[in-house]
Amino acid sequence: MKKIKNIVVVFALAALIIPMDLFSQVYKFSGGPSGGTFQYYASAISTIANKSNIKVLAASSGGSIENIRTCNTGKSSFGVAYSGNVYDALNGKLNQDNNKYKDVRALGFFFGAPGQLIVKKGSGIKSLKDLAGKRVGIGNAGSGAAANAELMFKKIGIWDKIKVEHLGYRAAADAFKNNQLDAFWVFAGFPNAAVLEVALQQEIQILDIWDELEKAGFFKENPYFSKVVIPAKTYNGQDKPVNSFQDAALWIANKDVPNDVVYKLLKTIYSKEGLAAMVEVHKSAKEMSIAGGLDGIVTPLHPGAAKFWKEKGVLK
Protein backbone atom coordinates (compact mmCIF):
# COMPACT_ATOMS: atom_id res chain seq x y z
CA MET A 1 0.00 0.00 0.00
CA LYS A 2 2.82 2.36 0.89
CA LYS A 3 4.41 1.74 -2.51
CA ILE A 4 1.13 2.50 -4.31
CA LYS A 5 0.72 5.72 -2.32
CA ASN A 6 4.24 6.80 -3.29
CA ILE A 7 3.46 6.19 -6.96
CA VAL A 8 0.28 8.27 -6.67
CA VAL A 9 2.27 11.10 -5.07
CA VAL A 10 4.86 10.98 -7.85
CA PHE A 11 2.18 11.23 -10.55
CA ALA A 12 0.46 14.06 -8.70
CA LEU A 13 3.72 16.00 -8.51
CA ALA A 14 4.39 15.31 -12.18
CA ALA A 15 0.99 16.76 -13.08
CA LEU A 16 1.92 19.96 -11.26
CA ILE A 17 5.28 20.18 -13.01
CA ILE A 18 4.13 19.61 -16.61
CA PRO A 19 2.63 23.09 -17.22
CA MET A 20 5.88 24.72 -16.07
CA ASP A 21 7.85 22.48 -18.45
CA LEU A 22 6.15 24.23 -21.37
CA PHE A 23 8.28 27.25 -20.55
CA SER A 24 11.45 25.43 -19.42
CA GLN A 25 11.91 23.67 -22.75
CA VAL A 26 14.31 25.22 -25.27
CA TYR A 27 12.60 26.19 -28.54
CA LYS A 28 14.81 26.46 -31.63
CA PHE A 29 14.18 29.52 -33.82
CA SER A 30 15.62 29.20 -37.33
CA GLY A 31 16.58 32.56 -38.81
CA GLY A 32 18.76 32.88 -41.89
CA PRO A 33 22.30 33.46 -43.15
CA SER A 34 24.72 35.57 -41.12
CA GLY A 35 24.15 39.26 -41.85
CA GLY A 36 20.65 38.67 -43.19
CA THR A 37 17.49 40.25 -41.82
CA PHE A 38 15.98 36.89 -40.86
CA GLN A 39 18.86 36.20 -38.50
CA TYR A 40 18.46 39.59 -36.83
CA TYR A 41 14.82 38.75 -36.12
CA ALA A 42 15.59 35.30 -34.74
CA SER A 43 18.29 36.70 -32.47
CA ALA A 44 16.11 39.60 -31.28
CA ILE A 45 13.18 37.35 -30.42
CA SER A 46 15.50 34.93 -28.66
CA THR A 47 16.87 37.73 -26.48
CA ILE A 48 13.45 39.21 -25.65
CA ALA A 49 11.88 35.80 -25.02
CA ASN A 50 14.66 34.69 -22.69
CA LYS A 51 14.10 37.80 -20.58
CA SER A 52 10.47 36.67 -20.28
CA ASN A 53 11.55 33.19 -19.14
CA ILE A 54 10.80 31.47 -22.43
CA LYS A 55 13.93 29.74 -23.66
CA VAL A 56 14.37 30.40 -27.38
CA LEU A 57 17.61 29.54 -29.15
CA ALA A 58 18.34 31.44 -32.37
CA ALA A 59 20.01 29.35 -35.08
CA SER A 60 21.28 30.36 -38.50
CA SER A 61 19.86 28.60 -41.56
CA GLY A 62 19.66 28.72 -45.32
CA GLY A 63 16.54 30.86 -45.10
CA SER A 64 12.83 30.71 -45.89
CA ILE A 65 12.39 27.31 -47.55
CA GLU A 66 14.80 25.53 -45.23
CA ASN A 67 12.91 27.06 -42.29
CA ILE A 68 9.59 25.80 -43.66
CA ARG A 69 11.01 22.29 -43.96
CA THR A 70 12.55 22.21 -40.49
CA CYS A 71 9.45 23.72 -38.87
CA ASN A 72 7.31 21.16 -40.67
CA THR A 73 9.33 18.25 -39.23
CA GLY A 74 9.65 19.85 -35.80
CA LYS A 75 13.44 20.15 -36.01
CA SER A 76 12.78 23.85 -35.49
CA SER A 77 9.95 25.18 -33.36
CA PHE A 78 9.93 28.61 -34.98
CA GLY A 79 11.25 30.28 -38.09
CA VAL A 80 10.96 33.17 -40.52
CA ALA A 81 9.59 32.51 -44.01
CA TYR A 82 8.03 34.32 -46.92
CA SER A 83 4.28 34.10 -47.25
CA GLY A 84 4.54 33.00 -50.88
CA ASN A 85 6.87 30.13 -49.95
CA VAL A 86 4.58 29.04 -47.09
CA TYR A 87 1.61 29.06 -49.47
CA ASP A 88 3.46 27.11 -52.17
CA ALA A 89 4.81 24.62 -49.61
CA LEU A 90 1.34 23.95 -48.21
CA ASN A 91 -0.01 23.30 -51.70
CA GLY A 92 2.87 21.21 -53.03
CA LYS A 93 4.03 23.91 -55.44
CA LEU A 94 7.61 24.55 -54.35
CA ASN A 95 10.13 24.49 -57.16
CA GLN A 96 11.10 20.86 -57.88
CA ASP A 97 9.35 19.77 -54.69
CA ASN A 98 5.72 18.62 -54.76
CA ASN A 99 5.63 17.59 -51.10
CA LYS A 100 2.87 19.26 -49.08
CA TYR A 101 4.15 20.84 -45.87
CA LYS A 102 0.99 20.74 -43.78
CA ASP A 103 2.43 21.11 -40.28
CA VAL A 104 3.58 24.74 -40.58
CA ARG A 105 1.47 27.48 -39.02
CA ALA A 106 1.64 31.26 -39.30
CA LEU A 107 1.98 33.45 -36.19
CA GLY A 108 2.28 37.02 -37.43
CA PHE A 109 3.65 39.54 -39.93
CA PHE A 110 7.19 40.84 -39.56
CA PHE A 111 7.99 43.03 -42.56
CA GLY A 112 7.71 43.35 -46.31
CA ALA A 113 10.79 41.79 -47.92
CA PRO A 114 11.79 43.69 -51.06
CA GLY A 115 13.90 42.26 -53.86
CA GLN A 116 17.13 44.21 -54.33
CA LEU A 117 19.39 43.44 -57.28
CA ILE A 118 22.77 45.12 -56.87
CA VAL A 119 25.18 45.86 -59.70
CA LYS A 120 28.12 48.23 -60.08
CA LYS A 121 27.57 51.69 -61.48
CA GLY A 122 28.95 51.92 -65.00
CA SER A 123 28.69 48.15 -65.54
CA GLY A 124 26.28 48.57 -68.44
CA ILE A 125 23.73 46.33 -66.70
CA LYS A 126 20.42 48.18 -66.86
CA SER A 127 17.86 45.36 -66.92
CA LEU A 128 17.41 41.76 -65.84
CA LYS A 129 18.03 40.54 -69.38
CA ASP A 130 21.42 42.27 -69.36
CA LEU A 131 22.52 39.69 -66.77
CA ALA A 132 22.69 36.92 -69.39
CA GLY A 133 26.22 35.49 -69.26
CA LYS A 134 26.95 37.24 -65.93
CA ARG A 135 27.85 35.83 -62.50
CA VAL A 136 24.99 36.38 -60.06
CA GLY A 137 24.78 35.60 -56.34
CA ILE A 138 21.18 34.63 -55.60
CA GLY A 139 21.24 33.62 -51.91
CA ASN A 140 21.88 30.38 -50.08
CA ALA A 141 20.51 27.15 -51.51
CA GLY A 142 17.19 26.50 -49.79
CA SER A 143 16.52 30.18 -49.17
CA GLY A 144 13.46 32.15 -50.22
CA ALA A 145 15.80 34.60 -51.93
CA ALA A 146 17.19 31.86 -54.18
CA ALA A 147 13.73 30.44 -54.90
CA ASN A 148 12.35 33.85 -55.87
CA ALA A 149 15.41 34.65 -57.97
CA GLU A 150 14.89 31.42 -59.90
CA LEU A 151 11.20 32.26 -60.43
CA MET A 152 12.12 35.72 -61.67
CA PHE A 153 14.97 34.73 -64.00
CA LYS A 154 12.99 31.83 -65.48
CA LYS A 155 10.10 34.15 -66.27
CA ILE A 156 12.46 36.58 -68.00
CA GLY A 157 14.01 33.65 -69.87
CA ILE A 158 17.63 33.87 -68.71
CA TRP A 159 17.82 31.33 -65.85
CA ASP A 160 19.90 28.94 -67.98
CA LYS A 161 22.04 31.82 -69.26
CA ILE A 162 23.32 33.28 -65.98
CA LYS A 163 26.12 31.82 -63.86
CA VAL A 164 24.38 31.17 -60.56
CA GLU A 165 26.25 31.31 -57.25
CA HIS A 166 24.41 30.16 -54.12
CA LEU A 167 25.87 32.57 -51.59
CA GLY A 168 24.42 34.19 -48.49
CA TYR A 169 24.24 37.98 -48.45
CA ARG A 170 27.50 38.65 -46.65
CA ALA A 171 29.44 36.09 -48.70
CA ALA A 172 27.91 37.48 -51.90
CA ALA A 173 28.82 41.03 -50.90
CA ASP A 174 32.43 39.99 -50.34
CA ALA A 175 32.55 38.20 -53.70
CA PHE A 176 31.00 41.24 -55.37
CA LYS A 177 33.63 43.55 -53.84
CA ASN A 178 36.37 41.18 -55.08
CA ASN A 179 34.98 41.23 -58.65
CA GLN A 180 33.94 37.57 -58.41
CA LEU A 181 30.30 38.48 -59.04
CA ASP A 182 28.68 40.89 -61.48
CA ALA A 183 25.53 41.19 -59.42
CA PHE A 184 23.95 39.89 -56.25
CA TRP A 185 20.35 39.48 -55.16
CA VAL A 186 18.97 40.33 -51.74
CA PHE A 187 15.40 39.55 -50.71
CA ALA A 188 15.15 41.13 -47.28
CA GLY A 189 14.18 44.28 -45.44
CA PHE A 190 16.05 47.43 -46.31
CA PRO A 191 18.53 48.75 -45.48
CA ASN A 192 20.33 45.41 -45.65
CA ALA A 193 23.61 45.28 -43.72
CA ALA A 194 25.56 43.53 -46.50
CA VAL A 195 24.42 46.07 -49.11
CA LEU A 196 25.16 48.99 -46.77
CA GLU A 197 28.73 47.74 -46.39
CA VAL A 198 29.28 47.36 -50.13
CA ALA A 199 27.78 50.79 -50.89
CA LEU A 200 30.28 52.46 -48.55
CA GLN A 201 33.20 50.93 -50.45
CA GLN A 202 32.02 50.91 -54.06
CA GLU A 203 29.60 52.77 -56.29
CA ILE A 204 26.54 50.59 -56.71
CA GLN A 205 23.23 50.67 -58.51
CA ILE A 206 20.01 48.88 -57.56
CA LEU A 207 18.16 47.80 -60.67
CA ASP A 208 14.61 49.05 -61.18
CA ILE A 209 12.92 45.75 -62.09
CA TRP A 210 9.15 46.23 -61.58
CA ASP A 211 8.16 47.28 -65.12
CA GLU A 212 10.23 44.56 -66.79
CA LEU A 213 8.63 41.85 -64.65
CA GLU A 214 5.13 43.27 -64.95
CA LYS A 215 5.36 43.25 -68.77
CA ALA A 216 6.48 39.62 -68.59
CA GLY A 217 3.36 38.66 -66.58
CA PHE A 218 5.37 37.72 -63.48
CA PHE A 219 2.92 39.23 -61.00
CA LYS A 220 -0.14 37.63 -62.58
CA GLU A 221 1.46 34.24 -61.96
CA ASN A 222 2.60 35.16 -58.44
CA PRO A 223 -0.18 37.33 -56.96
CA TYR A 224 1.23 37.30 -53.40
CA PHE A 225 3.98 39.69 -54.53
CA SER A 226 3.28 43.42 -54.24
CA LYS A 227 4.98 46.56 -55.49
CA VAL A 228 7.46 48.36 -53.25
CA VAL A 229 9.51 51.50 -53.68
CA ILE A 230 12.98 51.55 -52.15
CA PRO A 231 13.40 55.23 -51.21
CA ALA A 232 16.27 57.33 -52.54
CA LYS A 233 19.23 57.55 -50.13
CA THR A 234 18.49 54.13 -48.62
CA TYR A 235 22.07 53.28 -49.58
CA ASN A 236 25.09 55.46 -50.15
CA GLY A 237 25.09 56.77 -53.73
CA GLN A 238 21.50 55.69 -54.44
CA ASP A 239 20.10 59.00 -55.69
CA LYS A 240 16.72 57.83 -57.02
CA PRO A 241 13.86 55.68 -55.70
CA VAL A 242 13.81 52.13 -57.08
CA ASN A 243 10.69 50.16 -58.05
CA SER A 244 10.78 46.51 -57.07
CA PHE A 245 8.51 43.83 -55.57
CA GLN A 246 8.16 42.31 -52.15
CA ASP A 247 6.74 39.38 -50.26
CA ALA A 248 5.65 39.34 -46.61
CA ALA A 249 8.14 37.88 -44.16
CA LEU A 250 6.19 35.91 -41.56
CA TRP A 251 6.80 34.34 -38.18
CA ILE A 252 6.03 30.61 -38.50
CA ALA A 253 5.92 27.65 -36.13
CA ASN A 254 5.42 23.92 -36.03
CA LYS A 255 1.77 23.10 -35.32
CA ASP A 256 2.70 21.18 -32.14
CA VAL A 257 4.38 24.07 -30.33
CA PRO A 258 2.17 24.50 -27.22
CA ASN A 259 -0.58 27.09 -27.59
CA ASP A 260 0.41 28.80 -24.33
CA VAL A 261 4.01 29.27 -25.50
CA VAL A 262 2.93 30.81 -28.82
CA TYR A 263 0.38 33.06 -27.07
CA LYS A 264 2.89 34.30 -24.47
CA LEU A 265 5.59 34.93 -27.09
CA LEU A 266 3.24 36.96 -29.27
CA LYS A 267 2.04 38.92 -26.24
CA THR A 268 5.67 39.68 -25.34
CA ILE A 269 6.99 40.56 -28.80
CA TYR A 270 3.97 42.61 -29.94
CA SER A 271 3.84 44.59 -26.70
CA LYS A 272 4.91 48.24 -26.78
CA GLU A 273 8.24 47.33 -25.16
CA GLY A 274 8.75 44.31 -27.40
CA LEU A 275 8.13 46.23 -30.62
CA ALA A 276 10.48 49.01 -29.49
CA ALA A 277 13.19 46.41 -28.82
CA MET A 278 12.67 44.86 -32.27
CA VAL A 279 13.10 48.24 -33.99
CA GLU A 280 16.36 48.77 -32.12
CA VAL A 281 17.67 45.56 -33.67
CA HIS A 282 16.48 46.25 -37.23
CA LYS A 283 14.68 49.25 -38.73
CA SER A 284 12.39 47.04 -40.82
CA ALA A 285 10.58 46.11 -37.59
CA LYS A 286 8.88 49.52 -37.80
CA GLU A 287 6.40 47.67 -40.02
CA MET A 288 5.36 45.42 -37.14
CA SER A 289 2.14 46.43 -35.40
CA ILE A 290 -0.97 45.02 -33.79
CA ALA A 291 -3.18 46.41 -36.56
CA GLY A 292 -1.02 44.87 -39.28
CA GLY A 293 -0.28 41.65 -37.44
CA LEU A 294 -1.99 39.43 -40.00
CA ASP A 295 -0.85 41.26 -43.16
CA GLY A 296 0.23 38.93 -45.94
CA ILE A 297 -0.94 35.74 -44.21
CA VAL A 298 -2.88 33.43 -46.55
CA THR A 299 -2.28 30.10 -44.74
CA PRO A 300 -3.61 28.64 -41.44
CA LEU A 301 -2.79 30.30 -38.12
CA HIS A 302 -1.43 28.48 -35.08
CA PRO A 303 -4.22 28.16 -32.44
CA GLY A 304 -2.12 30.10 -29.92
CA ALA A 305 -1.76 32.89 -32.48
CA ALA A 306 -5.48 32.82 -33.28
CA LYS A 307 -6.24 33.32 -29.58
CA PHE A 308 -3.87 36.31 -29.37
CA TRP A 309 -5.12 38.06 -32.52
CA LYS A 310 -8.77 37.51 -31.55
CA GLU A 311 -8.11 39.16 -28.17
CA LYS A 312 -6.59 42.11 -30.02
CA GLY A 313 -9.60 42.40 -32.29
CA VAL A 314 -7.55 41.76 -35.44
CA LEU A 315 -8.98 38.31 -36.13
CA LYS A 316 -12.76 38.21 -36.31
Image (cartoon, rainbow, N blue to C red):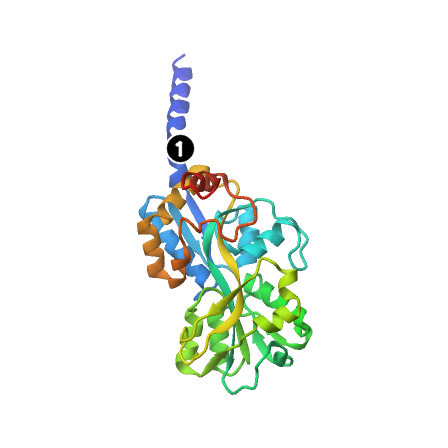
Question: Quick one: 88 or 182, which is closer to the camera?
Answer: 88
Label 1, secondary structure: give it. Answer: helix
Between 229 and 49, the one lying in front of the other is: 229
The residue that appears at 46% across and 42% down in the rendered structure is 305
| Residue type of the residue flagged with mark 1 | Pro
Quarter of the rendering containing residue 84:
bottom right
Q: Is residue 282 above or below residue 118?
A: above
Q: Say which residue appears at 32% left-offset and 55% top-offset.
A: 276
Residue 273 placed where, x, y %?
30, 51
Q: Can residue 229 be seen in this view?
A: yes
Residue 43 picture quarter? bottom left
- In percent of width and height, residue 218 lies at 64, 66
Q: In which quarter of the image is the N terminus?
A: top left
Q: Is residue 165 at least partly visible in the picture?
A: no
Q: Which residue is drawn at 43% across and 80% down?
A: 239
Pick the residue in front: 172 or 152.
Answer: 152
Q: In this view, does 190 lie above or below 312?
A: below
Q: Is residue 301 left or right of residue 16?
A: right
Tell me the residue at 43%/83% (across/down). 202
Q: Where is residue 109 in the image (x, y as percent from the top left)?
A: 46, 52
Image position, residue 160 (x, y; %): 68, 73
Give the labeled residue for mark 1.
Answer: 19
Compared across the picture, whether 102 is left or right of 58 comes to: right
